[in-house]
Image (cartoon, rainbow, N blue to C red):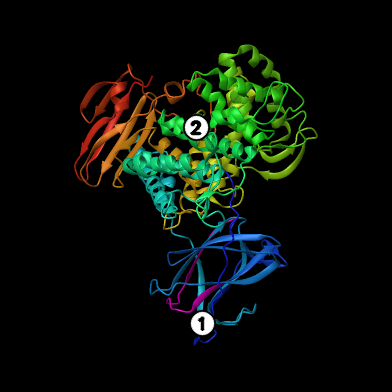
Amino acid sequence: MKRPCVCFLLLAIAAAGLQAETLAWMRLGDPEGQRYADTPYHWLGDAGLFLTIDVPPAAGVALDLLWGAKNDQRGAELVANGRRHMLQAGGFDGFQWQRVPLPADGPDTGYEIQLNAAAPKAAFFAAVRLVTLNTPMQETLPEEPAHRIRVQEPPPHELDVWAKELRRTDLDPWQRAGIHARQANEALRRCRRYVDGWLAHADPKTGLIPENLGKGKTIWNGRNAAADNYPFMVLTCAFTDPALFHGAMREMLRTETRLTSRLGALPDHYNFEKQGYHFEQADVRRLIFDGSEYVKDGLMPITEWLGHSPWSERLVAIVDSILHYAPHPTPAGNIPADDVEVNGEMMQVLSRLCFMTDNTTYLDMACRIADYYLLGDRHPTRDAAQLKLRDHGCELISGLTEVYAACQALRRDRAAAYREPIHAMLDRILEVGTNEHGLMFDAVDPRTGTVTRNVIGDNWGYDYNGFYTVYLLDGEQKYREATRRALACLEPHYWKFPWQGWGSDGIADSVEGAINLLNREPDVPGVPAWIDANINRMLLLQKPDGIIEGWHGDGNYARTAILWVLWKQQGVTIQPWRTDVTLGAVREGRDLHLLLAAEQPWEGRLVFDQPRHRTVMRMPLDYPRINQFPEWFTVSEGHPFLVRQETTTQSRDGRDLLEGLPVALTAGQTARFTVSGQE
């Protein structure tokens, strides 16, 4: 959920012995269309560019881009004959030539150049030219170059082909399941490469991954490496590689617990160069921030999927230390912080832990924090000068509504006291915090109604989790209608929207919100197609070595990809997973159609999901939660199910499906199953 600060430099390398020459060029943009500094341009935010140049690849050749900027930084992804470069330039007003050396190999027919939008803002260009590296960086173009540059339609990736196929209305369930199988397999392959990519950068002495591959490459910390990246390496391995899951992933947990726990279980920054703590002194506020990030963003998603494990034990230990060292005084006693992000995160975790552990101490603290905001003079919309509706602020909204949900089940008198201030908060957000489509601004002054950050945030779905939770609790249809309105706007108005720039993290957070809410409202038109189109954008940002962008937010790539896979497989997983084995699912009422195929002989199990909110978390209500993995087709022990394969029908208890339906496939075989009788 956090954003990187990474700068990619465009290279300019002198090539000796080559004649300075412009080999090919073209101007970009419609002369009658958009202009800047009285110059037509093409903006990658509208569409990417696919260029072909009929110049055979050779050493000492570069691509020049007449790069536009408005005293800001602009980004682009350039793929030249299959080689990927991330570009960033700017800090000037107008247009300047920027040069990128090109590979010397490729097809004899010439160069294929693809340009796509990238963070921090989509780049725009007025012209492009192919030159020798020693050509001066002048802004003039020759009258008649020897070769021409042509703009072509880019070849579609298989992911986009599959997504387009799914928009057809004449597909039968098995055809749809087959496409889902290919989509899920592609995403899992990429998640597995992401794990290898990051393990290649692990500290050789400790085995811990760095916070980032640029700034922070010698640091492991709770707030970033542990919270946002490592947990989704763990979950990827749980799906795809049991040996790595039980080996390196478990060892990394043992190591970080031993090396980074500083006050009780609270983690602090660990420095690989020092092989010790990065900071000389322990700062309880820093440690509590790191701990709250780790438990909410990382350990809780692992726990909601795996149940009791060493990771859930680490979660409880950190939470107990946060409660023990909570430094901020209130009339009712100390709370973890005077910070909406930390307190919002803790309310979410504590509200779930009180059910999972059957320990009301956690709800005591959750209510103490909720009292601080709802029953005093710190109400989020009545008293605050700013309400952040995006990351680093939206946690408060979900946290307060989660405490409200817990109190509805366990402390009805406290829930009654919270009802009016909760509803007042949500009503005011709808009044001043949303745009004409129901999506959220980054930040507003709720007292005056002024939008203080007029950007549409990628965490809109996290906010609507809270609205939908209160709808489930109180039956307030306006909160459900607001959620559905936001979902309905996605396809017509935000098809490929630049969430917080063009990086993977903004796409991941927005898609996560949409998948979570689609699980509750599956009939809103256009949402499945929008999710597919945007997950494809995100998946295709991965580099060949498995790294996505080289910062801790890469973990959110894997998190959202796994969310998408579970939707495409309706919660059923393959054990053991293999790259040539594919599984897709389609739900029709109480029937689940499963299509399983293998290129080589395979023997294993199809493991079904359970109602984890009840069996793992012991919660009475499956309300939408940040970083949860939604439940699709679930089974429970003691419930009968019919399993049909071709002409054979068997009756199976839910316990059998939870342990896994045994399957053996020959090379090239495809098996079809229909499971009926979901509770």
Identify the element where label 1 is drawn.
loop
Q: Which range of residues does the magenta coloring cover?
A: 46-64
Residue 62 magenta? yes
The residue lying toward the viewer, choosing from 385 and 106, is 385
3D distance between C-alphas at marks 2 and 1: 56 Å
Residue in the picture at 46% in, 40% down:
258
What residue is pinned by disc 1? 15
Image check: 271 left or right of 463?
Answer: left
What residue is pinned by disc 2? 315
Q: Position of residue 288 (x, y in %)?
A: 60, 36
Image check: 93 left or right of 294?
Answer: right
* Sequence-first tag of 2 and 1: 1
Up the image or down, 311 lies above or below 105; here it is above
Q: Position of residue 621 (x, y in %)?
A: 51, 20
Up the image or down, 330 lies above or below 408; here it is below
Residue in the picture at 25% in, 27% down:
644
Q: Position of residue 586 (x, y in %)?
A: 37, 33
Residue 387 magenta? no
